[in-house]
Image (cartoon, rainbow, N blue to C red):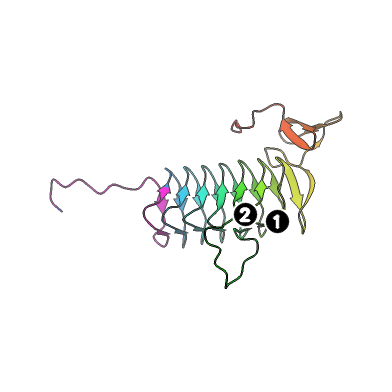
Amino acid sequence: MCDDEPPARMPPFFAHPTATVDEPCDIGEDTKIWHYCHVMSGARVGRGSVLGQNVFVAAGAVVGDRVRVQNNVSIYDGVVVEDDVFLGPSCVLTNVSRPRAGVDRRGRFEVTRLRRGATVGANATVVCGVTVGRHAFIAAGAVVTRDVPDYALVMGVPGRHTGWMGRHGERLVRGGEAGLWRCPSSGLRYREEGGALRCLDLDEDAPLS
């Protein structure tokens, strides 16, 4: 290397030597990509996210900021993972509802959207075309076949709405008056109206303190 040649520019993210990161792709600052991951050309991964061992991110996938993806998760074309989402080990996200090996469905992938702050538990399956609402909580092993409201707790096969989960990952308890719910950990209050839940004490987009 010549003395006047500028030093090689280091990427703003960390990738383990066993990881494959195809260029060009858009990976944010301070993101960590661990053993045997594969991020395809064209993929977008935000800032401060973590991809655990053996994670695959397809070219048309979008992963937001501060997302935690545990081991053995594939994020296919058509999947949109918003900020602060947690994807548990070996959870499954799909993009074709009626696949056949002999039928080419490329270009007709269905959008699966995981909204801000949602959690998908270990070995859970989210069938394509579904939106999982903000701060919703999909229990381990559940199979989600329909849209999930914000803050909903979904359990079972097929998944059923069985309660509400707060921002702090605690199941909410009734707050003493009709429609009022409370987090036993943080004390934050939530109001249920028309089958939807909203937080009374913290803006939906505000970070947890």
Q: Is residue 143 magenta?
A: no
**Residue holding disc 1:** 140
Vertical placement of 152 versus 91: above or below? above
Looking at the rendering, the stretch of residues picked out in magenta corresponds to 2-26
Q: Is 42 positioned to the left or the right of 147 in the image? A: left
- Residue 162 position, x and y percent, is 80, 47
Prevalent SS, magenta region: loop
Give the amino acid at mark 1: Ala
| Mark 2 residue element | loop
Q: Is residue 59 left or right of residue 135?
A: left
**How many numbered markers are drawn?**
2
Task: Tell me what residue is drawn at x 25 percent, y 49 percent.
Answer: 8
Residue shown at the point (81%, 37%) measured from the top left: 173
Q: Which residue is mark 2?
A: 88
Question: Which residue, as the protein is rendered here, is positioned at the far left?
Answer: 3
Q: Amino acid at mark 2?
A: Gly
